[in-house]
Image (tube, rainbow, N blue to C red):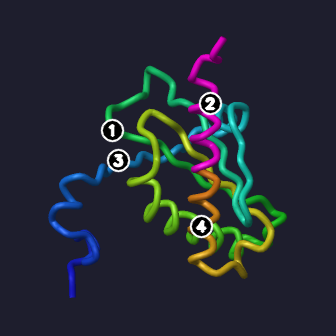
Amino acid sequence: MAARNSLPDILSVAEVGVAKRLRIDRLKKRADFLAAARYLRRVAGAVTLEMAPTPDPVRAPQTLRLGFTASKKIGNAVARNRAKRRLRAAAYALLPLSGRAGHDYVLVARAGILARDFAALKDDIAEAARTAHRKLDAASTPDKV
């Protein structure tokens, strides 16, 4: 059995050298959550992804910042904590490889997250990130005249 912190057995040595692994910092200040909510929002299944560029004073190389939230619509405190744990597990599996450095991501739990299959939850986060990245790329490329 592999060590808990080791890379998955699926990756070969060649893939490990190519794979980019971003460092993840946590969002903890309300102002950072509000900034992400104002910039870009994508909904997929049981997850809403809010995203914004990391402010320059706190930007670090090869790092993205990540936050999680679940409102009282999800349920009581136990249900909200469980929803955030599921979001954390899925995000830490996906975003170090598919996220973008220099951006803040906020994952918001939606109704149905507790009953959602974990593989489907990971697919929801991946789809939301893909569409958000496409939107950012479209906004950054100038229109052809």
Point out which mark residue 22 bears: 3
Coordinates of residue 57 in the picture (x, y in percent): 44, 21
Position in image of residue 137 (x %, y %) = 56, 32
Can you identify the residue that label 1 sits on? 62
Question: Of callouts 4 and 1, which one flags the residue occurring earlier in the amino acid sequence?
Answer: 1
Do the residues bearing badges 4 and 1 touch, measured as CB atoms within 8 Å?
A: no
**Given the current orientation, which residue lies at the most extreme bottom position?**
1
**Nearer the observer, disc 3 or disc 4?**
4
Q: Residue furthest left?
A: 13
Q: Quadrant of residue 52?
A: top right
Q: Is the residue under label 3 in contact with that under label 2 (CB below 8 Å)? A: no
Q: Nearer the viewer, residue 130 or 41?
A: 130
Q: Secondary structure at mark 2?
A: helix
Q: Earlier in the sequence, mark 2 or mark 4?
A: 4
Magenta segment main secondary structure = helix
Labels 4, 1: front one: 4
Q: Disc 3 vs disc 1: Cβ atoms closer than 8 Å?
A: yes
Q: CA distance from mark 3 to mark 1?
A: 5 Å
Residue 36 in the image: above or below residue 78? above
Mark 2 closeness class: few <14, some 14–19, many ≥20 residues within 10 Å: few
Could you tell me which quadrant the N terminus lies in? bottom left
Which residue is found at the position 71% from the left and 47% from the top?
A: 42
